[in-house]
Image (spheres, coloured by chain):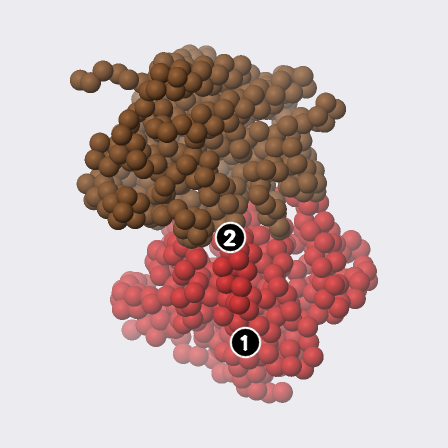
Chain colours: A brown, B red
Amino acid sequence: MTEDTRMAATHAANAYQKAGQARFREEVIAGGAPYVIAEAVTPHEIFHALDIPVISLPWYSAIISAKQLSPYYFGLMDKLGYHDGLPRYGSLPFMTTLDGDRDRAPYGGLPKPLMILERLRGDFGQKIGEQWARAFGGDVPLVSLDSSSLADLGSPWFDRNQHGWEELYGSDRLDFQVEQLKGVIALTEALTHRALDPEELRKVMHLVNQAGEQVDRAKRLIGGTKPVPVSLPEQLTNIMAATWNRGGQWAVDHLTAYCDEIEERIDKGYAICPNEKVRLLWVNNGLWFNTGFYRAFEESHGATFVWSMYSNFLSDGYRKYFDDGVDPLRALAARHISMNEQLHLPGWMAEWIVQQAKDYQCDGAVVLVPIGDRMSSFGTKICQLALEQAGIPTLELTASMVDSRLWDNDAMIAKVGRFIEERIAA
Amino acid sequence: MTGAEALARLTAAYDDRLGEARRRKAAGATIVGYFLNSVPVELIVAVGLDPVRLVGDPGRRASIADRYMEEYMDGEVRSIFGSMLTGDFDFADLVVIPRTSEVYLQLYYFLREMPRWEPDAPVPETYLFDLLQSPHWLTARWDESRMRSFAKRLETLGGRPVDDGALAEAIRLCNRLRSALQAASSLWRGETRLDGIDALKVIGAASVLAPEDAIAALDALAADPPEPLPSAPRLLLKGSPQSDPHVTALIEAAGGRVVAHDHVAGDPTFRALVAENDAPWEALAGHYQRHILGPRVHPQADQDAHFIALAQEAAIDGVIFFHDEWDDTLGWEYPDQRQLLEARGIPSLFLKRQPYFDPPAEDQRAAISDFLSQIAKVPA
Ligand code: SF4
Ligand code: SF4
């Protein structure tokens, strides 16, 4: 066994996540307290401010996969007639309900939630949501936030979305989104007999901005330091824990400690790959089942991944500042209204990622094109062309995000190795 | 016009859609092209412009499109993207893309990027029609405001301003076209006088011709119909849009007959009329929000009730589900729909993940023949 070189912050993040899970088990599963099932790109902040736990779909899917339960649930999907081309990963939590075996599902399965909250960006969220609500017995409301679209993508979005969001996203779209959020609040209040305190929501919104500021600080530290002081898997653990728990003081404190620790590492000259020669971007979905891949090229090529989509989206994508007197709900509306465009659509995705490559001093980019989740594959070609135009060589990897058994690790390592040798080091 | 002449006029318009559109353009029309069944043609008519529905073509695949668009996009959208880049739709003064399917929204954004990468491509002017379809009051309000902005945009193309009276009149005209299609549909859904290919062509032609011309031809066809066809297993084709007849042709070559097309290029395009009341904007918004077929329209149970009603009206012997290769949406409905059919003793065949370009025709034919041979009512 090699010694554990992980950051203290990483241990703290893991411990906090564990404690959160224990609390969920105790309060919700055993104690019957209300909770909400919500898609990732939805206003969890409302529930944070009401102190109602939120189960985020990608998070629960990840737990199911980590416990090696996905093959069982995919088998169930086959049996029920859901074809094998459907984006299945995100529907694993729904399958635990259809399966009905609470002993098999992580944490004893999801009990009946207060509501299922969807944002209708793709075409199928409402289809899954309706069937899921029915599987819970039919009396669980499906709340669907509809998603309006921008006709003109003003650019660059990341310079304009933190303060200039009213203009960037459009007042009519924001009006509509605010009205939809009011509906969510009213329903939640009616179902729980709790009242959303405006001051509490304001506080939550400020805390998310503060968390984003720390993530921005991490970006400047990591992007500006060669060789890089933090591994990508550790970046992800720390940032994701804060993202899922955004809006609490913990996220701000945790990220501050995380940045302090990065600074200490820099002061001491600590590097995860002292021999660093090549810095890489990882574009698109994370390789959650194999984060070790990000570090597989350090010894062989002095190459290390320093950035992924999640490294600083909590900074660039989430922060929404608002002046005194402005309704924090409007800032919250602005947060999710175009998230999908920012991460996955040709124009906005490409311009952001090219900027990331510059900020993190990257020499090349590996672009994952996921099979079985085509929504996340759109825009990757134009993104690659834009990176190449900016002088950043790219490599495309096509892989299933659903089934780790289809990941041929040796072949993928060989491919990335060759890419580094032929297109970057040469 | 005899029935035979009318049918010839309709099938010719379908077979040479682009030629038909160019002729209308040459005769002085301002053409507003649009995709899917979710763009309010009533508004285009009300401002005095000429709507033409645009579709893909499995025989048209432009390599320039593959440079930019991922292969996981619906085949028809890739074909359309290529057509937009290579000038196939150059007759259109404006092309309207509705936000009623994710891949069409993506198509819009891809097209918006093209001036940067392909500055010389003859991409027509595009307009995103941001229609949302969640069944909520707030959404209805949003949609009505989108309708009004769309009308303003159309006015800039030389149309006249739309007042309530003009809109009500356009709604009546488009309803007459839907009613004419409903009347004509007894020629395939009832005692069969048109096969499934002709049915598809008649439906498609109604979105290419000027409404008055289409109504005249449909009325003439219904008044003087062809002779009944010999009987064959009656099938409903459901799933991904079939703007092109090749799947229907395969089914009919194997001995089946498609008597109902339950997809966005088929019978549902004329299923419901727009309410003709004194609030025309609201009626129009409500119609496109909730009463048309589309992947985002819900609740699903409503859509499935329409499916079963169509199956019953057409007295079908079986259903063929046909899904595009990269379908990530319709497959979520399929298990419920299969159950509805099983409960009624209606057999079905599921052709999932079918490629749009270069389809495996032999495998498809074999699967269809096998299915037909299992249908009890196959004539000896
Ligand atoms: S990264 Fe994209 S696919 Fe993943 S949760 Fe965020 S928006 Fe959804
Ligand atoms: S059942 Fe049909 S007519 Fe009634 S609301 Fe639904 S789509 Fe409209």
Q: Amino acid at mark 2?
A: Gln
Cβ atoms under marks 1 and 2 closer than 8 Å: no
Instruction: Point out which mark residue B106 bears.
Output: 2
Instruction: Point out which mark residue A409 bears.
Output: none
Relative vertical location of residue B314 with respect to residue A257 in this rendering, above or below: below
Give the mark nearest the N terminus, 1 or 2.
Answer: 1
Disc 1: CA contacts within 10 A as few (<14), some (14-19) or many (>=20): some
Residue at point 57% right, 29% down? A319
Question: Which residue in the structure is indicated by mark 1?
Answer: B18
Percent position (x, y) of residue B37?
58, 60
Q: Quadrant of the N terminus of chain B?
A: bottom right
Beta carbon of the mark 2 residue lies under 8 A of ligand 1: no
Q: Nearer the viewer, residue A93 or A284?
A: A284
The Cα atoms of the two marked residues, 1 and 2, are separated by 24 Å
Q: Amino acid at mark 1?
A: Leu
Disc 2: CA contacts within 10 A as few (<14), some (14-19) or many (>=20): many
Residue at point 72% right, 54% down? B149
Q: Are marks 1 and 2 on the same chain?
A: yes
Q: What is the secondary structure assignment of the residue under circle 1?
A: helix
Can the viewer see residue B248 in this picture? no
Q: Chain of mark 2?
A: B
